[in-house]
Amino acid sequence: MLIVNPKKRITTQDALKHAWFECLDQSDGSSPSKLRFQSKLNHEVVTKLTEFKSESLLKQAALNIFVKTIHHKDLTHLQEEFSAIDKENTGFIDHNELLEAVEHH
């Protein structure tokens, strides 16, 4: 499906016959956009994902309150500390930068 020339690329129907799609239920003749997975997800996995999402939303809300209530002087200090760790000035702290900061402090 990644071949640009449509004459050389496989058809949608042939792609749907690929082993990757064997777990999809097409028994009702539905279109590819309405395919359903036959296998059921483990209940524990779904529960854990839901809990993770809830925790993430709680963390986001807590951080949002923190940012809105933090004193400007403290925020400036946090920005300086972040910039000291973010050696590549990407605005993100990658794994190596974090390891280096932990090792040096």
Image: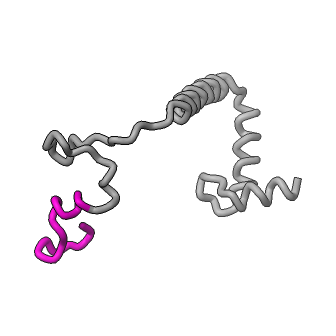
User: Where residue 95 sits: x, y (%)?
Assistant: 68, 57
Name the residue furthest right.
Answer: 105
Query: Magenta segment: does it hold 35?
Result: no
Foreground residue among 37 and 78: 37
- Expressed as whole percent of the image width and height from the top left, the position of residue 22 reads 31, 54
Front residue (pair 80, 47): 47
Q: Decide: is 15 above or below 69.
A: below
| Residue in the picture at 17% in, 60% down | 12
Q: Quadrant of residue 70?
A: top right
Res. 52 image quadrant = top right
Q: Main secondary structure of the magenta part?
A: loop
Segment colored magenta: 1-17
Which image quarter: residue 72?
top right
Residue, x 74% and y 47% (percent of image)?
Answer: 80
Pinpoint residue 35: horizontal percent, then vertical percent.
Answer: 24, 43
Question: Which residue corresponds to the image point at 13% horizontal and 43% vertical from the top-left?
Answer: 29
Using the rendered image of the protein, determine whether residue 13 is visible from the camera's viewpoint. Answer: yes
Q: How many marks?
A: 0
- Residue drawn 23% across and 62% down? 15
Q: Which is more toward the observer, 89 or 1? A: 1
Q: Is residue 38 left or right of residue 100?
A: left
Seen from the viewer's position, the closer of residues 36 and 54 is 36
- Residue 31 lies, with reference to residue 42, above or below; the image says below
Query: In the rendered image, is residue 60 in sight?
Result: no
